Structures are given as structure tokens and as C-alpha cells.
Amino acid sequence: MTLMTVEGISKTFRRGGVPAVEDVSFSIEPQQTLALVGESGAGKSTTGRLALRLIEPDTGSITFAGQDVRSLDARTLRSLRPRMQMIFQDPYTSLDPRITIGGSIAEPLKLHLGINRSDREKRTVELLRRVGLGPHHVDRVPTQLSGGQLQRVAIARAIALDPALIVCDEPVSALDVSIRAQIVNLLMDLQDERGLSLLFISHDLALVEVIAHQVAIMRAGRIVEIGETRRIFASPSHEYSQRLLSAIPGRKSA
Amino acid sequence: MEGDVLVPEATAAAQLTPVTDQAQSQIILDVRDLSVSFGPRRDPLEVLTRVSLQVRAGEAVGIVGESGSGKSVMCLATLGLVGAIGGRVESGSIALDGQDVTRFSQREWRSLRSQTASMIFQQPMRSLNPAFTVGDQIAEPLRIHRGMSRRDAWARAIELLDRVRIPHAASRAHDYPHQMSGGMCQRVMIAMALACEPKLVIADEPTTALDVTVQADILDLLDELRVNLGVSLIYVSHDLAVVRELCDRVAVMYAGNLVETGPTKALFDSPQHPYTSGLLEVSELKQRDGRLASIRGQVPPPSEFASGCRFVDRCDFAVHPVCDAHLLPLAPIGRDRAVKCIRHAELDLPGRSA
């Protein structure tokens, strides 16, 4: 069964302004990755936030795990939150600098699951281990970790509640290429292990080609082309997709 | 450093000379055995160790490596700017266009910078002054260094904006940086860098903050300017695909060391250092068993640099205690290549795939 279906969502932030997202539709299957690609300002991040109802869409419908997300009241929506999580681009600003790594990971366990302290600590260490960190990281604060390590913490926090979907907003674009591979591999491992679906927002087309099952190319708030990654990279049909794909470094001659 | 039996790397640097026309053979930048430290003099933290690099007239040299490898420190040192971020040159020498600038005062540097060598930074929006029009900012070095009148400098600024392909240059010169996109700001930075016709331009990750389509335009522009104006280019990046398109030669840095240098094609086709090979694999998104090839671990901080090979903890080919023994010099292999790996001769490392 399809995990998430988004139909015709639009968002205009300023009355009478240009729509940030216009009539966007897509669906995400279980254990699949849909990549949203496009240039800055294309509406990728806004689309990701609209899909999770972190921003309220003006129009359109969102179905997640059989539920009509837009009709849910705040309380029911909150009970659905553990199933849909998000990872952001800049791990330095997405984690609270005053809270320890352990505290950041344990917080959702306490808020959503009401797990007691000693169990939380145990779970936190398990989660840290799962993302390649260790118990000695529990008492550190974000400034003591590297960008790659912080992104691992953000992933640990996101998977703490056993979600079905993670929206990853440029999760590796602030990282070095060597670290990028480590983080992407971790996400792919977790996808296989837990049947995770990923909405992967990125401007890194070469990376998207490798990891995404489906790809949606956005421009000026609209999806200009969507489909199977292999098909689109082999023969993009929209003029903009062709231009975007030909800009990948090292592909120029192809 | 204890147990350090370093051979001066000048010998290796001399071997880096590519075979080129006589006209091309003039050395614009000659860095030899450069070491840079930070922190108190009694207990210094060495972040750059005995780095040697030469750049010839009209040549594009790529410097690649992860964050923390010392790329930016090396570039700043090259332009006498390392003091501004709290570092100091401990040993070695830097010559720009035949002039030894190692002990230059800030006053001496000021007249040399932008006339002989200039720099383009990663964040164009932050590098430009938000309180002045872009035209004023391009005209400033012309008035200071070239003694041009306000009117002449402004006219030249417009020419330069046109040269970097900013449409409607005459009217855009009146714009402030916030009125321009990131790509346009980077073009302005390039125009500024070129204003006084330097012989060397150092571009430190100039496209990292830009979209791919804009990145492709900026790279085209840099390449065109290099070919047409004969400027030498140092291009710092962690993106090997970009370096491959743009550069004649590549220097690979790791943890404050140069670990491999050579002509771009040879270096990418048959890397001799495990780190170079690993970087190639990760940047080409090579796959093994359905996962991306990666380099495990991360670059150590300078306080934890190993006394032997600094890549030893992350290297799949490390042999103990051979690799831990001491820091090797960058040893010449063949005519214009050099590598810092004790096992390079016995390793057959994967290179570029296509």
C-alpha cells in the first residue's frame, strides 16, 4: 500500500504573491526513496514541510498511512508525528547547542512514548551505536562533534520513534564527500532494516541517481517531471530536466 | 617533531615540473617546505607541514582534500593572510612572480596583493561589502593600486562586469550586493579579483555555495578567463569532478600534508596514494554491494596528527609498524609526479572509472 499520497498541494506565503509551491502531486511507496531535485528557490524544502504539515498547505490533499492528514486536529496529528520525521541540512543549527547529544535523542522518547529515564538512557545508547557513535558521545554537546557526527545524531533522533517516513532536507550537502558516502550508506542501511521511506530533497543530481527509486524535478514551485530515476536520467523528456542533468560536473561530454 | 628524518621536499618539488613550452615555463608561485602553526609559540599546533607547490604561468592547479586538510590555510599563507586568522609561517619559503615574499610586512603585501595575486572566496555574499555598490568595490583596488581617477576606475569596473558576463553592466554597477543573486555576486568577486590584472588567482571553493547550473557557468567563466588572459589559477575544492574539468595538475592534501601531486589525467587514472584513490571513489559515487564506497573515520584534528603517515587510521592498506614509523617526504615518482606513501610501489589502486 502506498505510504503517502500528496495531491495538488499549493502554498502562497504572501497574499497576491508568487506561489512557492503550486499544484504539486506525488506518492511514496513503502521502503522507497523519492528525490525532490531542483535549484534553490524551486520549492523543494517547502514541499517537504507541506507534506508533513509543518506548513499548512492552501489547497490539496495529503494521505499518510491511510489517514487524511489535512483533516486531522492538532492532537491526532501529534500522535501521527512519530511516524513521520525530518532531518535538516545544517546539523550545527538543527540541534540545540545547550542540550547534550544524549538529551537530544532522549527527548522524543520522553515526549511521545513516555519511556522512563533508565530505559531512555538504554535506548539512547542503542540508537547512538546504531548510527556509528558510542556511549562516550552521550554527554557531549553539539560543538564538540564534527558535522558528520552531528548528522548521525540527527538520524538517531529521527529514527528513535520508529518512523515510516523521513523527510531528508539536503542531509549531506554541508558535508565532505567522504563523509557524505558514510551518511548516505547509513540512511540506506536503515531503509532496508526498518522498511523506511525517504523523501530526499537534494540538488546533488549524481547522488540522487544512485540512491533514489523515483525522482521529481522541480522548478519555480512546480514538478516539471516525475518518474522512475533510471528512466529520467536516461532520457529526460522535459527541456528543463535535460538542462539540469547536463549541468552535472563530469557529465558535460555525455 | 621527534624522529623526523625529512628530506627537504624541494627536491621533490623540482621534479613536479611538467614538460611544457619555454613560454609556459615561468614559475608564478613557488612554495617550498612551508610549515604553518597556530597557538602559543611555546606549544605550537602545526597545521601545515612542509608543503611544496609550484604554479606556472597560465596553469590551473587544483588543490583537493577534505575539510581540515589545510587547503585554505595554505592559500591564505600564499597571500600573506595567514596572520589574519592567527597563524604564522614557521619555516619554508614563498616566492610570487620571482620575488621572495616569505618575510613581507603587511605594508609590502598590500601593494603586491591584487596586483600579483588575488583571491576569490566561497561565500560571495559575505565577501562583498553590503554598504557599497558593486561598481565601487571593483573600482576601489584600481584607484588604490593603479592611481586611477574615480571616473576612469568606474568605467573600467563596468568593462570588468561586462567581461564576467553580467548583463547590462553599466546599470548593474550601481547595484548593492543584496540586489544580486549568489552567482552574480561570485561574478563580481571574479571581476574584483581580476581588476588589477594579477598573474595568479586563488579560488577557494568558489562554487560550493551555488546551484549546479550556476556552478557550470562560473567554471566556464574561470576557464575562459584563464585561457584568454593567461592568468594562473589555483582552484581549491573537495569536488574532484570539477577539478578534473578545470585543472592541468592536482595536489592532494590530507591533514596538513601534500600526499600526492601530478598531472590531472595521470593522477586520476592511476592514483598512487590510497587517500587519492579513496577520494576518487567517494566523489564518483562508486558502489560496492549496493552501498557507496566511503572512507571510514574522519580527518583528525591537528593535535592528534600521527607521527608517521597521517592517513594511517583510515587507510585500508596500512601495515604496522611500517606506516607509523615516520613522516615520509613527498617522493618523486616518474617525471612530474610525487607521492607520500611508503607502500605506493606495491599497491595497485583503483582510479577513475570512465
Image (cartoon, grey):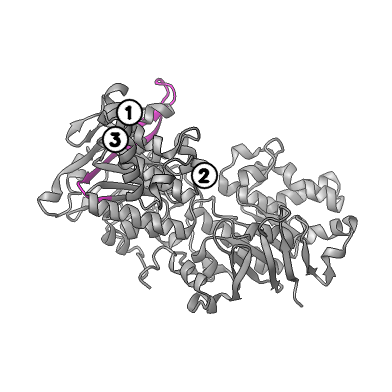
Residue at the image position 30 percent from the left and 57 percent from the top: B272
**Chain letter behind tag 1:** B
Res B269 quadrant in image: bottom left
Residue A103, percent from left and from top: 74, 42
Q: What stretch is highlighted in magenta?
A: B36-60
Is there any visible trace of residue B317 in the rendered image?
Answer: no
Between A156 and B175, the one lying in front of the other is B175
Residue at the image position 52 percent from the left and 59 percent from the top: A181
Q: Which amino acid does label 1 sit on?
A: Val
Res B49 quadrant in image: top left
User: How many angstroms separate mark 3 from mark 1 (CA)?
Assistant: 39 Å
User: How many angstroms separate mark 2 from mark 1 (CA)?
Assistant: 39 Å
User: How many angstroms separate mark 3 from mark 2 (CA)?
Assistant: 24 Å
Q: Which amino acid does label 2 sit on?
A: Gln
| Residue B89 - label | 1
Mark 3, residue position: B152
**Chain letter behind tag 3:** B
Residue B72, percent from left and from top: 39, 40
Q: Which of marks 2 and 1 is nearer the N terminus?
A: 1
Are dots 3 and 1 on a single chain?
yes
Mark 2, residue position: B179
Q: Answer yes or no: do the residues labelled 3 and 1 have beta carbons within 8 Å?
A: no
Residue at the image position 17 percent from the left and 44 percent from the top: B14
